[in-house]
Image (tube, helix red, strand yellow):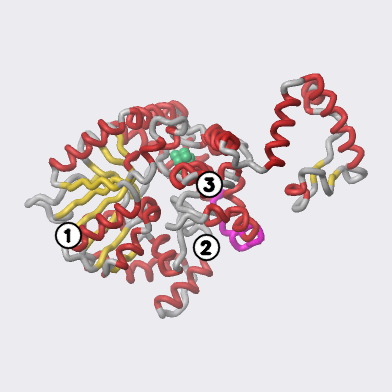
Amino acid sequence: MQNNSVNFKRQVTVKLADVRLQNALSRLQSRFVGGRAAVISEIDDFQETRVAAAAIRDRALNDLEHWLLQFEQQATARGAVIHWAENGDDANRIVAEIAALHGVRTAAKSKSMVSEESGLNDALEKAGVQVMETDLGEYILQLAHEAPSHIVAPVVHKNKEEIADLFAEKHQKPRKTDIAELCREARETLRPIFLNADMGISGGNFLIAETGSVLIVTNEGNGRLVTTLPRVHVAITGIEKVVPTLEDVTTLLRLLPRSATGQSITNYVSLLTGTKDSSAHDGPEHFHIILLDNGRSSILGSDMQKMLRCIRCGACMNHCPVYQNIGGHAYGWVYPGPMGSILTPLLGGLEAAPDLPNASTLCGACGAVCPVKIPLPDLLRNLREKQMQRGMKTQREVFMLKAWTWLALHPNIYKLATKIGVKIMSIMGGKDRLLHSLPGASGWTNGRDFPAPTGQTFRELYQQGK
Ligand code: SF4
């Protein structure tokens, strides 16, 4: 997928004016945020499990080469073929070669964000392979020629009416608005695709070094159909997804669905190990696993390594006030929200996504909900620092930051300056206690008023216990 993050600010203006989008995004609050809050209270050691999960991910990342090689050895021993892809083009070329090798004309695909990274569908279409998305959300997006806007709920930006219009147009059937009927219509369209596809393509939530298995979690049966019915199965995932043991995965599975969709467990947890043996009724005859680097190894060992702990639950974006208002497309690439604001610059370069590290209020909600305890606000601040060091800030920002630093290092002058400042702002606030414009902060006051302070500084109020 082409990285369009450089246009973030322009996209934000468009998205903020889109009332329909904001109505659609409000569903995240009730379904995912509310659902998560309810379901994490089911387990009394949720916080301890987060600590354990972070340790599991760190153990894997600190010795990634070892665990990946063990995964390769175990998977190969069970009949799978491992392919190492340095970048997205490599991954696409490898899948196209596998398709050519096995005479594949049609492929059924379940959700894979890594394949979105590489733009796999377009590459396969060019190679003469017809690809059909089978996850309901991804199928809708394929019909609409759109990219996902959320890593767990890819079509969250669309409402039921839009989907009804789309199905009526593309399926050439009477328009339906009942959700169950819309699902049935999609199922009827997709069922022959599962049955006839030459190749199934899936992602992989985890790779298990101990057994050479790929684990996927899904709520629709499409993941199982795609990975067991076609004679060839290709799983494509990032190198950071490996974990040492099956036991490790059970810890992570206590957190992933709870954090993602507010479920204790997803409808399906599929452990895919090796090729079909002679006694099995189903399963692929050929199992290829593509392990994509695409910049991940350059994060390893750096001060940003903790970002690679990510298990793609989406909780950080569900709780992010920025994402909640602009949705995923504004971020311009595969990964939106706080995790995308870090991962996109890390994988694609800070210069290609200069606004993303600043697309956060640093309220801390993302870090507080992350199941693997990634310090997202710290990493965002770290990227901002790198921008400063590389001279990517405007002269005005540099001046303001330097002035702030100087003030912060001179507490008495700081105290005096803030005292005078709040007094002036209090007078400027007038009777309605609002500032309609503020020198140097027009970005705020162009869109909304700034509440006038009471005339006392924060320190004074704090000392008074207010
Ligand atoms: S950064 Fe944390 S909260 Fe966000 S998607 Fe990754 S694991 Fe989930």
The mark nearer the N terminus, 3 or 2, is 2
Residue position marked by numbered label 2 in the rendering: 158
Q: Nearer the viewer, mark 3 or mark 1?
A: 3
Few, some or many residues within 10 Å of mark 3 (<14, 14–19, 20+): few
Q: x, y (%) of residue 453? A: 83, 36
Q: x, y (%) of residue 184? A: 37, 68
Which disc is residue 422 wearing?
none
Query: Ligand 1 within 8 A of label 3's CB?
Result: no
- What's under tag 3, amino acid-wise? Glu
Query: Ligand 1 within 8 A of label 2's CB?
Result: no
Please tell me whether mark 1 sits on a helix, a strand or a loop: loop
CB contact under 8 Å: marks 1 and 2: no
Q: Residue at x 29, y 68 (%)?
A: 130
Please determine whether, in this image, residue 233 is positioned above or below residue 35. below
Few, some or many residues within 10 Å of mark 1 (<14, 14–19, 20+): many
Q: Nearer the viewer, mark 3 or mark 2?
A: 3
Marks 1/2: CA distance? 34 Å
Q: Is residue 320 magenta?
A: no
Residue position marked by numbered label 3 in the rendering: 351
The N terminus lies in quadrant:
bottom left
CB contact under 8 Å: marks 3 and 2: no
Q: Residue at x 23, y 42 (%)?
A: 213
Query: Which residue occupies the foreground of this view, 459 or 410?
Result: 410
Q: Which residues are magenta?
A: 15-30
- What's under tag 1, amino acid-wise? Arg
The C terminus lies in quadrant:
top right
> For the stretch drawn in magenta, what is the main secondary structure?
helix
- What's under tag 2, amino acid-wise? Lys
Residue position marked by numbered label 1 in the rendering: 231
Query: Which residue occupies the foreground of this view, 411 or 447?
Result: 411
